[in-house]
């Protein structure tokens, strides 16, 4: 990841003028989504939005984070998507070395590949507040309602981590997750997900 934390990325966006803080109290019931939709529709390269006070909770909500090409490039710390594609091709399909000097030039690439897999750590920033068992209450999070007719708040792009039961390969899927109860989310998956 190009940044150590979401906080670091938000600070970078704010310094570039690509983050709009909304400090007025707003409701997660359609208001966050409506403001975000308005910004995205009226300004395709509009800013990321950081809502500081959603439903009186202390947890802020950020939307439209990757809503522009410039912010996607900034998140990856690259100048163009061609640069990223070239870097990937260079890593996965390097030229065959013609001698031991060419082989030595591949060492930095191999070292870079070794840093790509996820690394397990004993502590992380995401573990600053840990809730388990009866302390879990997803209802305290300002999960927005985005569309009329929704039965419950939905995380529109929840990232689900799983392991393939046969190969053991890591699987990452972005799926909607609907709040069902204080400690239950329903994942909306489609065939092939």
Image (tube, grey):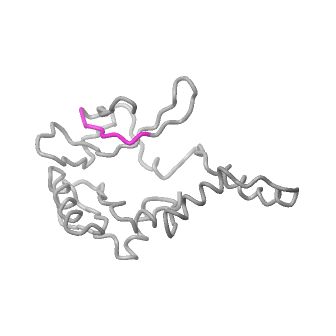
Q: In which quarter of the image is the C terminus?
A: top left
Q: Is residue 140 left or right of residue 119?
A: left
Which of the 4 image quarters holds residue 106? Answer: bottom right
Up-down: is 168 above or below 66?
above
Which of the 4 image quarters holds residue 160? Answer: top left
Residue placed most toward the observer, 173 or 153: 173
Residue 14 is situated, as x and y percent measured from the top left of the image, at: 37, 73
Identify which residue is drawn at 39% across, 65% down: 69
Q: Is residue 121 left or right of residue 102?
A: left
Which of the 4 image quarters holds residue 104? Answer: bottom right
Direction top: furthest residue: 166
Residue placed most toward the observer, 44 or 46: 44
Residue 54 is situated, as x and y percent measured from the top left of the image, at: 21, 56
Answer whether residue 185 is magenta in the image.
no
Tally the marks: 0
Up-down: is 27 above or below 179?
below
Residue placed most toward the observer, 140 or 18: 18
Direction right: furthest residue: 100
What's the magenta region?
173-180
Identify which residue is drawn at 11% across, 45% down: 148
Residue 45 is situated, as x and y percent measured from the top left of the image, at: 30, 69
Q: Is residue 100 left or right of residue 15?
A: right
Q: Is the magenta stretch mostly helix, strand or loop?
A: strand
Residue placed most toward the observer, 44 or 31: 44
Residue 22 is situated, as x and y percent measured from the top left of the image, at: 23, 67
């Amino acid at each position: 990841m190009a940044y150590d934390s979401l906080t670091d990325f938000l600070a970078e966006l704010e310094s570039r003028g690509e983050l709009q803080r909304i400090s007025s109290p707003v409701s997660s019931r359609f208001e966050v989504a409506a403001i975000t939709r308005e910004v995205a529709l009226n300004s395709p390269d509009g800013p990321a939005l950081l809502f500081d006070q959603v439903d009186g909770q202390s947890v802020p909500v950020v939307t439209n984070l990757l809503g522009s090409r410039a912010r996607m490039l900034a998140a990856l710390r690259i100048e163009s998507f061609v640069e990223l594609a070239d870097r990937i091709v260079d890593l996965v399909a390097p030229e065959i070395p013609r001698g031991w000097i060419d082989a030595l030039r591949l060492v930095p690439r191999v070292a870079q590949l070794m840093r790509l897999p996820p690394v397990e750590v004993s502590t992380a920033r995401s573990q600053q507040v840990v809730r388990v068992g009866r302390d879990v209450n997803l209802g305290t999070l300002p999960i927005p309602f985005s569309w009329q007719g929704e039965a419950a708040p939905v995380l529109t792009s929840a990232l689900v981590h799983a392991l393939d039961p046969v190969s053991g390969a890591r699987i990452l899927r972005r799926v909607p997750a609907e709040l069902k109860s204080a400690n239950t989310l329903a994942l909306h998956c489609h065939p092939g997900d």
